């Protein structure tokens, strides 16, 4: 079976990890700081803080911008549950805004109607690796004095108006994931990028139990070199040096990985552009798409399951991204209901993610084209 996504680990990555395993520091050594420095430099931000998952990175970013009990934050329902769960961890309430049917990104024209006196934060999700229209998001945020945290877990290597996603040109912070199906991997892992020193310092403490060893921040009397203080309730969200070393090695190959994803997407686009059965993902003229996913949308939603099942039977590990967050029983218990975001719901009912990852060969790609075309003909023409 050809999966919809997978990592690419080579001998260089393996040898780098072996080397760090032979050192004295495999948890909180220098590789963490090196990885953070390289990420910040690559993305064009002042600061990077790495975490043990994309979820913990989201949690930390929301905390660092001040999201707290009783607040509301606006985000997309067309995302993995971590995007909204991270706010629930802090006692805030997610408010779901509908999406654009073509990109799957937040429909910025609907943002203002979701804002209340309790709104503190907007979390645009760069769905599938296609950046949201961040100028418009920032315009709304600035008008109402709101923070912006970009959920860019799909979008490492993408650009918006020639600025790399992660530069935080239009936001307070940007969050990435290094899960194996993402653009680079650390096994599990994540990062927050920011240009604000106050956010940076909170992130460092939040991932380490709320602890600081910075003498300038001490409230009580410094007692010796062993001394540290816990200032708020943080978590053990630290990444290990093992993971960071893998990330350093993977980051060297990021441009190659994104280029290969774009090449595959171009082949798909050329093959599928004139088909009668489904829509292909767009690339707006203001973005450089990173193609974490290649989502197609069947024109007849009633046939989506039949298409999905037959593609699976023929060896393609297709997936659906995503079940709208508020469809889940947990969210329904909180009072959310179907029908809140009709475009996102229709998008879900029509979407299928085709395989796309850099280790795919040309043979794999053309096999996928053959299978996809054959499946749609079989279902629609019989």
Image (cartoon, rainbow, N blue to C red):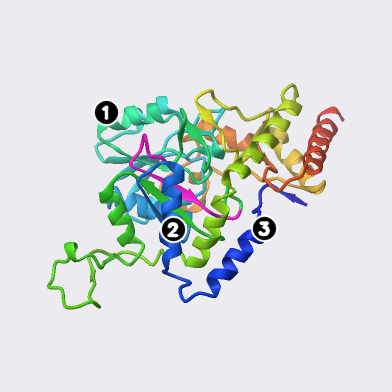
Label 1's element?
helix
Alpha-carbon neighbours of circle 3 within 10 Å: few (<14), some, or many (≥20)?
Answer: few
Q: Is residue 159 left or right of residue 146?
A: right
Specify the segment rendered in magenta. 167-180
Residue 325 — which label?
Answer: none
Q: Nearer the viewer, residue 155 or 317?
A: 155
Q: Is residue 261 above or below residue 211?
A: above
Query: Furthest residue to the left?
Result: 221
Does 261 sit left or right of 285 as displayed? right
Residue 128 on image: x %, y %: 57, 39
Q: Main secondary structure of the magenta part?
A: loop
Query: Residue 34 — which label?
Result: 2
Q: Nearer the viewer, residue 307 or 364?
A: 364
Label for residue 10? 3
Query: How far apart are the alpha carbons under marks 1 and 2?
Result: 38 Å
Image x and y of residue 78, in percent = 52, 40
Q: What residue sits right under mark 1 in the picture?
A: 143
* Quarter of the view holding residue 268: top right
Residue at screen point 75% across, 38% down: 307
């Amino acid at each position: 079976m050809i999966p919809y996504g997978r990592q690419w680990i080579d001998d260089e990555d393996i040898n780098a990890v072996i080397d760090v395993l032979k050192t004295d520091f495999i948890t909180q050594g220098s590789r963490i700081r090196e990885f953070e420095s390289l990420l910040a430099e690559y993305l064009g931000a002042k600061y990077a803080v790495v975490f043990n998952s994309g979820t913990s990175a989201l949690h930390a970013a929301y905390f660092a911008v001040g999201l707290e009990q009783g607040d509301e934050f606006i985000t997309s329902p067309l995302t993995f549950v971590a995007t909204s769960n991270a706010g629930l961890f802090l006692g805030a309430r997610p408010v779901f805004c509908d999406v654009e049917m073509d990109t799957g990104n937040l429909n910025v024209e609907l943002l203002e109607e979701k804002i209340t006196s309790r709104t503190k934060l907007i979390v645009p999700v760069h769905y599938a690796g296609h950046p949201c229209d961040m100028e418009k998001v920032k315009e709304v945020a600035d008008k109402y004095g709101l923070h912006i945290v970009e959920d860019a877990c799909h979008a490492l290597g993408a650009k918006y108006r020639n600025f790399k996603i992660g530069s935080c040109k239009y936001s307070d912070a940007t969050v990435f994931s290094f899960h194996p199906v993402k653009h680079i991997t650390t096994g599990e892992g994540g990062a927050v990028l920011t240009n604000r020193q106050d956010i940076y310092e909170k992130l460092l403490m939040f991932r380490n139990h709320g602890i600081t060893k910075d003498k300038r921040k001490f409230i009580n009397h410094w007692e010796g070199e062993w001394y540290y203080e816990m200032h708020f309730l943080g978590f053990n969200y630290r990444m290990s040096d093992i993971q960071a070393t893998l990330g350093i090695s993977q980051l060297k190959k990021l441009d190659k990985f994104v280029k290969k994803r774009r090449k595959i997407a171009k082949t798909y686009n050329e093959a599928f552009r004139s088909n009668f059965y489904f829509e292909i993902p767009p690339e707006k003229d203001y973005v450089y798409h990173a193609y974490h996913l290649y989502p197609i949308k069947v024109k007849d939603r009633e046939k989506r399951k039949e298409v999905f099942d037959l593609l699976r039977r023929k060896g393609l590990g297709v997936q659906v991204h995503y079940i709208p967050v508020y469809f889940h029983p947990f969210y329904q218990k909180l009072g959310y209901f179907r029908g809140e975001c009709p475009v996102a719901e229709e998008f879900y009912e029509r979407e299928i993610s085709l395989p796309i990852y850099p280790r795919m060969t040309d043979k794999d790609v053309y096999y996928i084209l053959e299978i996809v075309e054959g499946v749609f003909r079989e279902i629609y023409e019989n």
